[in-house]
Amino acid sequence: MTQEAAASTVAPRRSPWTRLLGRFSKYSALSLITVPVALTLLLFAVKLFPHVNAGLLNMLVGTVLTPPSFMLYRAVVWKGGSGRSVWRELFSFWQTVMLGAISSSIVIGVADALLDANGIMIIVASLLGQGIIFLLRFVWLDKVAFAKRALSPEPVAPGSLPCLQG
C-alpha cells in the first residue's frame, strides 16, 4: 500500500466539541440504565422500610450504587480514567453521586413529608432533583474527575537555553 493510500484510510481527527458531545451522549445513555436501577432499589427500600423517610433511603441507595456506577461510567464514557489514582476518581465520582442524591433526597423528602408520597410521586421527585444536577455532574466528571493529566514539561537545565548562554 502506498503512503497516499494509507494516509487516505486514516480517519480525520474529531474536534474537541465532537469528542465532548460523544462523551455526553454516552453519559446520558448510561443514565438510562443507572437511573431506573436506582429508582427500582429506592422503591424496594421504601416498601421494605415504610417508616423511614424516602429521602434518607435515597441517600443509602446512592451510596450502595456508587462503585458499580463508577466502574460502568469509567469504562464506557471515560475509557481508562484520568491516569491518576482510581481512588481519587472514585471519591470525586462519589461526591457527584452524593450531590445528586442530596438534591433528589431533599425533593423526595419534602414530597414524602407533605404528600405522603407514593411510588410515582417518589419517581417524579427523584427525577426532578437529579435533573437539577445532571449537567453540572457531567461537567465536573469530564473536566475534573476524569480529565486526562497534562504531561509535565521536561525540566530545563540552567544554561541549556540558547538565550541564556553568553
Image (spheres, rainbow, N blue to C red):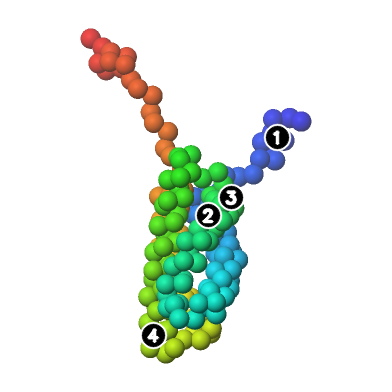
- Residue at image mark 4: 113
Decide if residue 126 is in sight here.
Answer: yes
150 over 135 or under it: above or below? above
> Which circle's residue, 2 or 3, is located before the other in the chain?
2
Q: Nearer the viewer, residue 56 or 157?
A: 56
Calculate the distance from the C-alpha at mark 2 to the C-alpha at mark 3: 12 Å
Calculate the distance from the C-alpha at mark 2 to the C-alpha at mark 1: 43 Å
Q: Is residue 103 left or right of residue 159?
A: right
- Residue at image mark 1: 6
Q: Amino acid at mark 2?
A: Pro
Q: Amino acid at mark 3?
A: Ala
Q: Nearer the viewer, residue 70 or 46?
A: 46
> Which circle's residue, 1 or 4, is located before the other in the chain?
1
The quadrant of the rendering that contains the N terminus is top right
- Residue at image mark 3: 75
As drawn, the label of residue 67 is 2
Give the residue displayed 35% in from the left and 22% down from the top: 155
Decide if residue 22 is in sight here.
Answer: no
Give the residue displayed 28% in from the left and 13% down from the top: 159
| Residue 24 point in image, percent of width and height | 52, 59
87 over 65 or under it: above or below? above
Disc number lying in front (4 or 3): 4
Would you say the residues marked 1 and 4 are in contact, meaning their CB atoms lie under 8 Å apart?
A: no
- Secondary structure of the residue carrying tag 2 is helix
